[in-house]
Image (cartoon, rainbow, N blue to C red):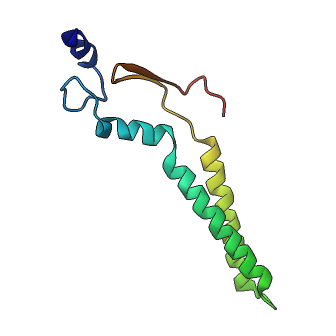
Amino acid sequence: MKKNNEDNNKGNKMDFNDDGKISFWEMFPYWFDKLRIFPRVFISVYIYMFYNVANWFMLLPEPNNAQAGLVSVVVGAGAAWFGLYVNSTGKGVETVKYNEKNVKSTKKNQIG
């Protein structure tokens, strides 16, 4: 039975060292991409920055054009980043065997 599992994993793109097993470090990039960790952290940092910039600007007694321009750039950058985040798409369907379990990603048919 062990030989059969090794034959099934031989053509697997995720098994980088061809030992018949997919380790945590071989699986990590797949899940990092699937869970979209980097974009979520980046948008969270932007929300925090936007909140602080908006509060700073509202507390100014007499804001000038340069300060208003800074707020405008921060808001515009956020709109561009959010548009890229929402409109990004996946690569397709992949099936990966991990410790005798099938993990399937159906990004083509996914809504949102």
Residue 68 seen in render = no
**Image quadrant in which you'd find residue 44:** bottom right
Q: On the picture, is 75 further left or further right than 58?
A: left
Q: Is residue 11 above or below residue 43?
A: above
Comparing 26 with 53, the one in front is: 26
Q: Whole-percent x and y of residue 3? A: 18, 11
**Image quadrant in which you'd find residue 20:** top left
Q: Quadrant of the N terminus?
A: top left
Q: Whole-percent x and y of residue 49? A: 63, 69
The residue under the point 52% across, 44% down is 36
Tell how many labels.
0
The residue under the point 61% across, 55% down is 81
Q: Quadrant of the C terminus?
A: top right
Q: On the picture, is 48 further left or further right than 4?
A: right
The residue under the point 38% across, 40% down is 29
Q: Whole-percent x and y of residue 103? A: 44, 23
Residue 59 seen in render = yes
**Image quadrant in which you'd find residue 24:** top left
The residue under the point 51% across, 40% down is 35
Q: Whole-percent x and y of residue 46? A: 61, 63
Q: Is residue 25 above or below residue 4?
A: below
